[in-house]
Every structure is written in C-alpha cells, then in structure tokens.
Image (spheres, coloured by chain):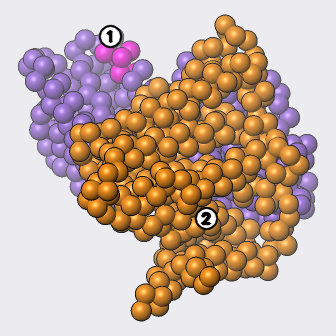
Amino acid sequence: MQRRNLMKAAALAAILGGAGAAYAQDAEKKIIGVSIPSATHGFMGGLNWHAQDSIERLGETYPQLEFVLSTAGDAASQVSDIEDMMATRNIDALVVLPFESEPLTAPVAAVKDAGKFVTVVDRGLSQDGIEDLYVAGDNTAFGRVAGEYFSENLEPGSKVVVLRGIPTTLDNERVEAFQAALEGSEIEILDMEHGNWNRDDAFTVMQDFLSKYPEIDAVWAADDDMAIGVLEAISAAGRSEEMWVIGGAGMKQIVERIMNNDPQLPVNVTYPPALISSAIEMTALNFVSNAPMAGRYIIGSQLITPENAEQFYYPDSPF
Amino acid sequence: MKPDLHTLGPLIALIALIVLGALLNSAFLAPANITNVLARSAFIGMIAVGMTFVITAGGLDLSVGSMAAFLAGIAIIAMNAALPGLGENWGTILIGMGVAILGGIAAGFLNGALITKARIEPFIVTLGTMGIFRSLVTWLADGGTLSLDYGLRTLYRPVYYGGIGWVTWPIIAFALTAFAGEWIMRHSRFGRHVEAIGSNDRVARYSAIDVGRVRLLTYMLLGLLVGLSTVLYVPRLGSASGSTGVLWELEAIAAVIIGGTALKGGRGRVWGTVVGVLILSLIDNILNLADLVSPYLNGAIQGVIIVLAVVLQREKRTADER
C-alpha cells in the first residue's frame, strides 16, 4: 500500500511539475489550490466530480481566477501536494478537505502563516482558528435525522441492525447521534458492524446478520454504497418483504428508487458531496466580490422523501 | 505411507474454527450460512489456486485484486455496449464473460512477459500493474461506479445466486478449480516443472525445462482464474468501482502461505490453499456472528490466526526434518 501511494505521489508530482512549466506568470491572476482525497469510493467520486465541475464553471465565469486541483490517496501525499502548490504555483488561497485532521494541521497552518486564504472542508483541523472559512456537512444531524425517522416509523419493540463506516470520528459522531435519537423509543439495536462504506463488505456483513437474526425490521446502512450491498443480501435471502433500509448521502440510483416509491427504500438522508462546490465557490467569491466570506458554514442534513426527491437528483454526477 | 504432517496444521486450525463457530452460534451450521461462506470464498479461492502456481514457481503477483476490479469494469462496459445491438439475452452476457476471461489471460501475459522477457522482479512488475489496473477502473468509472444494465443483471444474477440446491455455481466453480489445480500440480508435467523451477531454477534450466515459458504460463493461468472469478463476481452486485477487490491480492497470498506453500517457492499445495481460503472467510463469518470482541479488533484476530496457522505448520515441519 505504502509503495503504491508513493508511486501515485510521484506521478502526481510529475503532472504538477509539467503543469508548472507550462504556466506563464500573470500578476493579475489569483490562483486557488484545491486539495481533496482521491475517488476511492462512491461519495468521494461524487465529490471529485463536483469539484471538477465547479472549477470548470468558475474558471469560465471569472477569467481572473485560476485553479489547481490535486487528489491524494493518503494524508502523506496530500501534505506533499500542498507543499508543491505553495512552492511551485504560489497559490493565493487553499481549499482543502483534510484526509485526516492531525497530520494536515501543521502544513495547513503553514499555508495560513504565509498569508494565504484557507478554506477547510468537512473534516476540521485539530487546532481551532487556522482556517478563514470552514464548510462542512453536519454528521450529528446525519445520524439524528435517520434516527428520528426510525423512532417515528417503527413500532416499540422493533429490531434494527446498523452498518458502520470506516472507523473514524466522523462515523462515531453519526452513530452516537443515531443512538441518541432512538433513546426512549424501545427500538432495539441488535448489532452494529463496520461495512467500511463498501458494497462488498456491506453485502458480507448483512448476509451474516441475516443468518444470525431471524427477525430484523429495519436496517440503517448509513451510506448508499452500503445500502446497495445490503439490499442485495436481503433479496438473496428472500427477506425483502420483512425490512426496509435507510442509506445516506443521496446516491442518484437510490434517489431514483425513492422517487418511484420503492417500499424497501422509504427515505434517504443527505450528506451532499457537492459541499466541495460550496467551499470552492465561496473561496472564489472572496477574491471577486466584496461579500465577507469568513466564518463557519454548516450544510444541514435533510430527509429525502418521495415528495421532494426530484430536487436531490443529479443524473450527470457519477454518484 | 506416513500421513503428510505439513498439511495437518492448517487443517487442524480449520476444524477448530468450525467447532468454535458451531459452539458460538447455532446459525453457523445452517445450510444458508454455509452456502454464503463458501460462495463468498470462491473469488479469492479461485485466485488463490492460481496464485499457488505462481508462488510455487518462485514468483509473486500483487496485481490480482486490481486486475479483478479492472476486468469487472471492462466486462460491464462491454455488456452495456453490446446491449443495444444484441438485446437482453445470454449472447450479450457471454460477450461480457469472454471479455473478462480473455482480458484476464492478456493481463496475465503482460505481467508474465515483463517478468520473464524483460527480466524485471515480479514484485516490481506486479506492483506497477496493480497501480495501473486500479487507476484504470477508477478512470473508466469516472471516480464513481460502473453499473450493469438492470435487465441484463436480472438475467445474469443466477450465475452467482443460482445453482443445484444449496450448492451455488460459485461453489461448484471453486471446487472444480481446486480439483483441476490439484491434479495439474501433482500429476501433470507442467506441475512438476513449476515445482522444479521454484526449488532451483538453474537446475531446472540444465534439465532442459523452458523456465521462461513455464513461468509465463503460471501468470497466464492466474490471469485466467482472475477472469473466471470476475465472471462470478459481476452478477453478485452488478457493479465495479475503484474499491472493488481491494486487498484481494494479500488475502490470496495469505491463503497460499497458510496452506503450506513456501513463499520462496518449490513446494505447492493446492488443497492447503483451499483450506487457507476457508480459514480466512470463516474468521470473518464467526466474528460477525459471535460478538466476541469489539469490531475494531477484527483485523487483529485475523492476524493472530494467520500467524498461528503458519506457526503450527512450521513446527510440524521442523519436527519432521529433524
């Protein structure tokens, strides 16, 4: 793994180096660097697509802005990317979605100390007050909105199972909020296992849940990639009538099924990958308008229902 | 004839795991659970049988997980592309299967040719192709997921879920691969050449064995088996993405080593590999069924059992050699 990532970093450095050589100095231009994790699963794929989409659109609207996008496979190569952006591209602003909080804190603080505008997206740094602008989804609301739907729509005494993501603070926040929302509802959480936001892992875990528990009334899959694996395991076991599944993040295939009133997928909870667009857009506005763009901007998690599903449907996005 | 002590270690571990599983949860021995475990072992299992030949001949292939993802991706693209012309029928699906299998053989040829003709270390070649295949599938999927057309999927689905009673097609394919692999390793000239090259390739060369050709064939055989497991994998979820088949290469290599094949080559045990694959899937299954430890520790338990299985087998071997 380590070596593979090293190679990726080397390839990326080569690309960045090539771009740097072709770049002609222009004093008027403002350069915005965007550093995000690479597209390793559905949600990040969507995020990458939205990042490229908004960069293209903003580049056309504001010719005085230039963007540098880099994607990294792990925290260490993301640090190198940011250092390269500072050294070779002399960026004026940095939009960063930190792979992990701890290792990225010092490098991003260094960018800030050099007098650049810093926007941090989704995962906070481990020290407060470094970033000018913080744009994030609301993980607590993500768990709470799902939990509330469960407690309102299940009878007391119902049994549910939960699939968790990759073990991270983000996953903990979601699950804690979900459990808090179920408190007092007499709904029993039979089991929780990590499906790692991966279809195959979720499929396997759900198969084992189905072997283990003769009665399951609902599943919180917490992610739409996992929801797809879960649905397949349920249908292979012939128990589709017995339970419904709530995913999360608003993948287009899932939203489409909600629009069509699929009884197995009653609702979904948003955690929009397009939040990267909000961050890039607001950073760009900082340079082209007088609107103040500092502070914290939290994007709420909403419930997608068959009635409002249409406004959450992006047919062009890969996610 | 004295019973082969080397193979007993992993077998004992497997039996211990089965007993443990049965004691912890009565659902463990239910036919549905056994079918699940065997069917999900089939992908890694078929790849691991191929890997046994590569490792026995003194090689290594790190690219198989990425290769499976890439083959699944191109098979899905091929089927979706053929759909408007051919319609929703088995012809279209056969094209997808053909693409996966031929693609697998070609990918194996690429690895093998770089190793034997260009004389680059297998570790480096396959590390390179691992990155290449993984990036290609992410690029083809535009960072998202490639999904097979819904109608075709419904038609193709029984290839994973169907079968003869509880014995589903992946289990049958895995069993046939294991029998064929065992026969080739033990009774064919190719199998004996593979072992000869792995124990000492210079001696093998002096014995008029075409070392390069045999090595190349082991990689092509592995590619073919990766292609076959892709054929079974695609109907399961009908999709492929950058996260398909992550770490399959390490699971396959671990299964081969647990099974008693020496990582330095020369001694191949196909049955051992099958046992190794089953041990790895059972650990996961039991941990999910049993709530023994915090899910954070699942990886640690797996690690301990892998090391234990190999230690058991090493002690038997040194006792034997003494």
The answer for how far apart the CA atoms under marks 2 and 1 are is: 62 Å
Instruction: Supply the letter of whichever chain is orange.
Output: B
Circles 2 and 1 on the same subunit:
no
Q: Amino acid at mark 2?
A: Trp
Quarter of the figure with residue A16 = top left
Residue A60 numbered tag: 1
In this rendering, the answer to whether B297 lies above or below A155 is below
In the rendering, at what x and y percent does residue A87 appear? 11, 38
**In what quadrant of the picture does the C terminus of chain B appear?**
bottom left
Question: Residue furthest toward the front?
Answer: B207
Which residue is at the front of the view, B118 or A311? B118
Q: Taking the image as drawn, is residue A73 in sight?
A: no
Report the residue at 36% width, 54% height from top: B59
- Residues drawn in magenta: A54-59
Chain ID at mark 2: B
Secondary element type, mark 2: helix
Q: Nearer the viewer, mark 2 or mark 1?
A: 2
Disc 1 residue type? Glu
Q: Magenta segment: does it hold A55? A: yes
User: Residue A214: which quarter of the image?
Assistant: bottom right
- Nearest the viewer among A48 and B31 is B31
Which residue does the numbered mark 2 point to in the structure image? B271
